[in-house]
Image (cartoon, grey):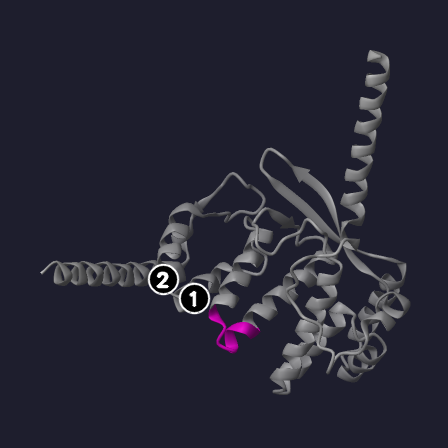
């Protein structure tokens, strides 16, 4: 009997290890409960005709998980068909002709880099609404390939910006946050900027710290700004991760911390005055 129990235990461990391995590689196939971008059926073409048949697939894999630090490291990957379209995109970009990008957009309306480049072109022509729609379409395509364990809410997910396949996700999130801020959704822009920073907090490749305090002040998150300025350390020298410095080396954070302290003191004094009036 003990020999049989040992065999069953080994089989159970082997099955669990196999499931974990499959989950790391094919987690993007599992359905996500919360979606960031809703499909726009009125403006966008049918995704089922363009995802795998023409453009190919872009998906996210869980490449490493650090149980001690509680961090999960992800990476986007392309299949063979998507790599072919990506090569065509680079060739058309090298010609410096916007019509080339527009033609590629008609052929592959859900190619991420084409959508982001098209949004820049539309921005320069003053067509801001259409440019924002391109960013949302690119983010929708990326979201369909996200891993099931990747979360927009938690801060334990990491992406390496030095990997070329990951850069489109950084840029799409960044542009989407800026578009939300222009529409007046300052709290949503604040939360998304925090998410962009949490993907690579030590290197901060898109310099999210230069506008994070602005969205925090616009959202009225004065206490969060003061707490974040005390605890967060920046890495000035990216080659040496042990060399960390205070966040107040940034001029914008010096002003934002002082501004947040001023409003926090006003709030506290107002609460004290209301308490004294109520007591009388």
Q: Which of pointers 1 and 2 lies earlier in the amino acid sequence? A: 1
Instruction: Write down the quadrant of residue 213 in the picture.
Output: bottom left
Number of marks present in the image shown: 2
Asked if residue 157 lies left or right of residue 207, the reply is right
Q: Which residues are magenta?
A: 179-186
Q: Is residue 128 magenta?
A: no
Residue 268 x %, y %:
23, 58
Q: Residue lying farthest top? A: 2
| Mark 2 crowdedness (10 Å alpha carbons): few <14, some 14-19, many ≥20 | many
Name the residue rendered at 73%, 74% in the picture. 115
In front: 144, or 260? 144
User: Image quadrant for the N terminus?
Assistant: top right
Name the residue rendered at 39%, 61% in the picture. 221
Residue 184 x %, y %:
48, 76
**Marks 1/2: CA–CA distance:** 8 Å
Q: Which residue is mark 2?
A: 256
Q: Which residue is mark 1?
A: 214
| Mark 1 crowdedness (10 Å alpha carbons): few <14, some 14-19, many ≥20 | some
Q: Main secondary structure of the magenta part?
A: helix
Mark 2: which secondary structure?
helix
Residue 150 x %, y %:
66, 51
């Amino acid at each position: 009997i003990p020999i049989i129990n040992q065999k069953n235990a080994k089989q159970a461990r082997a099955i669990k290890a196999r499931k974990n391995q499959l989950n790391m590689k094919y987690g993007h196939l599992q359905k996500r409960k919360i979606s960031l971008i809703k499909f726009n059926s009125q403006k966008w073409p049918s995704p089922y005709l363009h995802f795998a048949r023409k453009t190919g697939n872009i998906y996210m894999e869980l490449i490493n998980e650090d149980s001690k630090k509680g961090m999960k490291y992800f990476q986007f990957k392309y299949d063979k068909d998507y790599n072919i379209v990506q090569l065509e995109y680079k060739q058309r970009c090298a010609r410096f002709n916007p019509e080339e990008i527009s033609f590629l957009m008609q052929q592959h309306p859900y190619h991420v880099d084409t959508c982001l480049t098209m949004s820049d072109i539309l921005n320069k022509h003053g067509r801001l609404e259409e440019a924002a729609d391109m960013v949302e379409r690119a983010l929708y395509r990326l979201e369909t390939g996200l891993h099931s364990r990747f979360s927009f809410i938690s801060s334990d997910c990491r992406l390496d910006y030095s990997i070329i396949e990951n850069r489109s996700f950084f840029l799409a999130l960044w542009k989407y946050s800026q578009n939300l801020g222009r529409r007046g959704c300052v709290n949503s822009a604040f939360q998304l900027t925090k998410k962009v920073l949490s993907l690579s907090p030590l290197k901060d490749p898109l310099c999210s710290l230069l506008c994070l305090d602005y969205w925090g002040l616009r959202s009225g998150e004065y206490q969060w700004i003061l707490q974040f300025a005390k605890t967060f350390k920046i890495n000035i020298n990216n080659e040496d991760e042990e060399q960390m410095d205070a966040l107040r080396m940034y001029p914008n954070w010096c002003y934002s911390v002082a501004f947040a302290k001023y409003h926090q003191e006003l709030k506290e004094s107002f609460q004290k005055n209301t308490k004294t009036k109520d007591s009388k």
